Amino acid sequence: MARDRLLARDRIVPLLILVSVMLGWELATRVFQIPRWVLPPPSAVVQALIRDQRLLLRHLTVTLEEVGLGLIFSVLLAIVLAIGIVSSRLVERSVYPLVVASQAVPIVALAPILLIWFGYGLTPKVIVVVLVCFFPIAVNLVDGLRGVDPEFVDLVRSFGGTSWQTLRVVRIPGALPAFFSGLRVAAAVSVIGALIGEWVGSSAGLGYLMIRAASQFHTDRVFAAVLVSAVVSIGLFWIVGVVERIALPWRRPARTET
Amino acid sequence: MKSAPLHWRVELRHVTKTFYRGRQALTVLGPLDLRVADREFVGLVGPSGCGKSTLLNVIAGIEQPTSGEVWLDGEPAPERLGRVAYMHQRDLLLPWRTVLDNAILPLELRGIPRREAAARALPWLERFGLAEFTHAYPAQLSGGMRQRVAFLRTLLADRPLLLLDEPFGALDALTRASLQEWLLTLWEELDRTVILVTHDVEEALLLSDRVLVLSPRPGRIVREIVVDLPRPRPYEIVTDPRFVRLKAEVLAELRARSTMEVQFDGT
């Protein structure tokens, strides 16, 4: 009983906060008579969402493709880097600083260069997504592979296991929780990578749609595109969580003892 | 004593172990000579920090001795990894594997197909009272059950020599007593050679044919006590006058060697 009430409260309170913010926003735009092209009320954003749904959907698919490919390449790159860094001192010394340095490169400055190199197509956007996303995955994976209990390694060795078997039986499964933590961060920020890539130069995608709508003062459409991007971010974050729960059944909370 | 066999199951010849940290050298073990016959159960007791675990690591081949040699089955064995079954003090169950997959780990590492390995493990799980937990994860088990799974895994490694490093050290007194009793009945039909490291004198005497007392660091064997109590031994033997006398003897030896460090568990 008490638990049910707690659960209801956990859901109702955030919903109430959201609704009151929306109502305040809606009222403010009306009371202060803010023009729609400056700040559209939520109702206008919802209208734009419904009115422009086909347009939004078309650009969404482009962005999703960039994000999806970007995440896949990020994971592959992160795995290669992490295994290299963990298994070789030389690789660690020479590559790890570069990995960190890559995060200091201002993507907004890099994106136009990628445009020059790769044109307006898919490639430069995927590269930007990878640049944003591989880092949290790689760093978490390195920590995960390193953080494995050395006594587990000794155990496998004492049974005559090879170092490859140690990797397969102990290190990789032990690193998976950290890997998923990194992947969740990457999933959440991946969309912004794609949008930046599109802002610099493109002919499709939610980022392109935002720029174009803003230049035409279709501010409600800009907000609708932002909303869609946010939902994509949340959705990706959630999907990674679901995959994690399926892939790591042993991490589910232990049985409740009564 | 038993008549000497043709060869010893395990033999340590003048083994020492020194760890170096920077310029500092710390000798934790030896020189130490030890011979264990086939199917013998030897208990090693000593104060904490006397290098007992290092000794087992050396026998298992996880660490190499600084000097001296380890022989297995009458031959020098410089590479021993995989030839000896080693059970650590911590259960070391892999949290992402079920009870079954943890138990069959040594078989899997030797390339035995999972189905065959499982077929071998299932009757044992039954015997160990773990059948209904076959597909449970370690986090769902009690400490005593986890330790039994770890023991089963050591057993399934199917090696003639078992090294047990304080296998019940982390358990509460009741669970420990019941597991000691369980191991006592189990071992009599197992046909294995066991070296048991413990700081529980009662546990050592209850289970062993021979108890060796180690000195404080660097650990050396300072006393050998033959436990000439008949087998099968019931758990109640701990109150037998002969048992009590042996226990007093071991404790006196330990007390003489170290005034502060001995832990009297299981008393």
Image (cartoon, coloured by chain):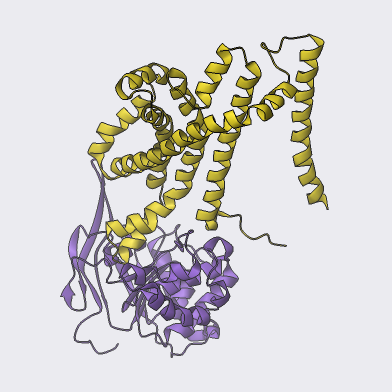
- The hue used for chain B is purple
Evaluate whether residue B251 shows in this view.
no
Give the image quarter of residue B228.
bottom left
What x and y, as percent, mark residue A251?
55, 54
In front: B90, or A183?
Answer: A183
What x and y, as percent, mark residue B162?
35, 74
What x and y, as percent, mark residue A6?
78, 45
Give the image quarter of residue B94.
bottom left
Q: Please determine whether, in this image, residue A97 is positioned above or below residue A242.
A: above
In the image, taking residue B34 as reference, residue A33 lies left or right, namely right
Q: Please determine whether, in this image, residue B259 is positioned above or below residue B149.
A: above
Evaluate whether residue A224 shows in this view.
yes
- Quadrant of the image containing the C terminus of chain B: bottom right
| Residue occupying image coordinates x 39% and y 25% | A103
The number of discs equals 0
| Residue occupying image coordinates x 53% and y 63% | B137
| Residue occupying image coordinates x 75% and y 41% | A10
| Residue occupying image coordinates x 39% and y 30% | A122
- The hue used for chain A is yellow
In the image, taking residue A72 as reference, residue B36 lies left or right, namely left
What x and y, as percent, mark residue B156?
38, 76
In front: A113, or A215?
Answer: A215
- Quadrant of the image containing the N terminus of chain B: bottom left
Q: Please determine whether, in this image, residue B165 is positioned above or below residue A218.
A: below
Question: Which residue is situated farthest in the left direction here?
Answer: B76
In front: B75, or A167?
Answer: A167
